[in-house]
Image (cartoon, grey):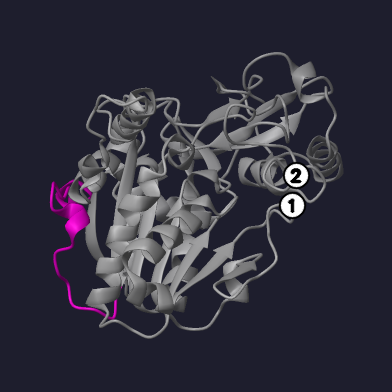
Amino acid sequence: MAEMGGSRRGPGEGSLSPETGPAREIFKRIEEKGPITFAEFMEVALYWHDGGYYTSSRDRWGKGGDYITSIDISPAFSRALAREIHEMWLILGRPDAFELIEPGAGRGWLSKGIFSTVKDLYPDLHRALRLRLVEKNPFLREVPSEHVTWHRDLKEIGRPVTGCIISNELVDSFPVHRVEQREGLLKEVYVGFDGSSLKDVYGPLSTPEIGDYFRKAGVTLAEGQKAEVNLDAVRWMGTVAAMMERGFVITIDYGLPARELYAPERRDGTLLCHFRHTVNDDPFVNIGLQDITTHVDFTTLAAEGRALGLELTGFTTQKNFLLGLGILEELSAPGADNTDFDKIRWNQAVKELIMPGGMGDAFKVLVQHKGVDKRDIMCFSFKDMSGYLF
């Protein structure tokens, strides 16, 4: 392959104990064929059928899990999104069937929250709305009902879609390749084993797609700079564009435009692991038990979408997005009754969703459209940052 690097972070024995299904599979593959790409390592750690992080029965969300999402913080998040879904339905001409598809639905709280708000506020849309929830984890998929069906992947839906495909914190969990600029050449960082611990191993690119990715983004890494390449995000955008006939694609995630994501000062990349509400940068510990994420390259998502027929509707921060949707209307005015404490907690949760320097800025929202004329939509009425993408 090439020269061996140091261990990622921390002691090697963390990779071996506790021994999980994904850890056993990773060591087996390295033993059989030598170092593997980090994308393969990450795919097994997160999605292996025997105890992968996203395919096991363990809790991941809330106080008893590893992290808290916008859905956990406040139902105001779903309520605000319901307003945008209603506007999109109107833009499409009030179709009799409007499909809301959520890949990576998890517990389904986001789409179910939207559906509940639509039922209360928009009865005409409610009659047309159908939820298609896509979730790999068999422990989370539920029995289908009149308005809700569950699917293992987007291919099960397949047919041309009229409606909206929405994802929230999905693309950041796709397996990525890791690379480093070394002596003027782009090298891939593989995962190897030296007999005691997992190690970074440097070698040639495993696929020319990696070099093509940087060329399309107009990016050259600085000497010694590490970065991640999310080829699965590119492929996912192709799947989404192919199945969308008329409608919108909403991608909510933490990430940056390419020129910021791959800026020279970001020398170590963006890979982070989440375990029991702590954050670390060592993917080689707690294999199968911790989340592994990287920032999303929104420039590439927008560019790939455009090449495949998905036009750019807008791009902004979660704060600007929610302010455009009128989330401040969710704030409860304090009164003289005994519910003031609940109102305070509700207001604090709403504020957390739009907090500058926190979730409000870290999370970005990309909206794309197909089969409809470009027009302004309310979620970008506060501020559209599309000019920062390219």
Q: Nearer the viewer, residue 60 or 223?
A: 60
> Which element is circle 2 on?
loop
- The quarter of the picture where the N terminus appears is top right
Q: Residue at x 14, y 69 (%)?
A: 375
Could you say where residue 18 lies in the image, as x and y percent from the top left?
Answer: 83, 24
Q: Is residue 33 magenta?
A: no
Which numbered disc flags the more N-terminal residue, 1 or 2?
Answer: 2
Q: Residue at x 42, y 28 (%)?
A: 225
Q: Nearer the viewer, residue 75 or 247?
A: 75
Could you say where residue 137 lies in the image, as x and y percent from the top left?
Answer: 70, 53
Could you say where residue 260 lies in the image, as x and y percent from the top left?
Answer: 28, 36
Q: Is residue 204 left or right of residue 139?
A: left
- The amino acid type of the residue labelled 1 equals Phe
- The amino acid type of the residue labelled 2 equals Ser
Q: Is residue 331 left or right of residue 223?
A: left
First to last magenta residue range: 370-390
Q: CA distance from mark 1 to mark 2?
A: 7 Å
Q: Nearer the viewer, residue 154 or 191?
A: 154
- Neighbour class for label 1 at 10 Å: few (<14), some, many (≥20)? some
Numbered badge on residue 139: 1
Residue designated by label 2: 56
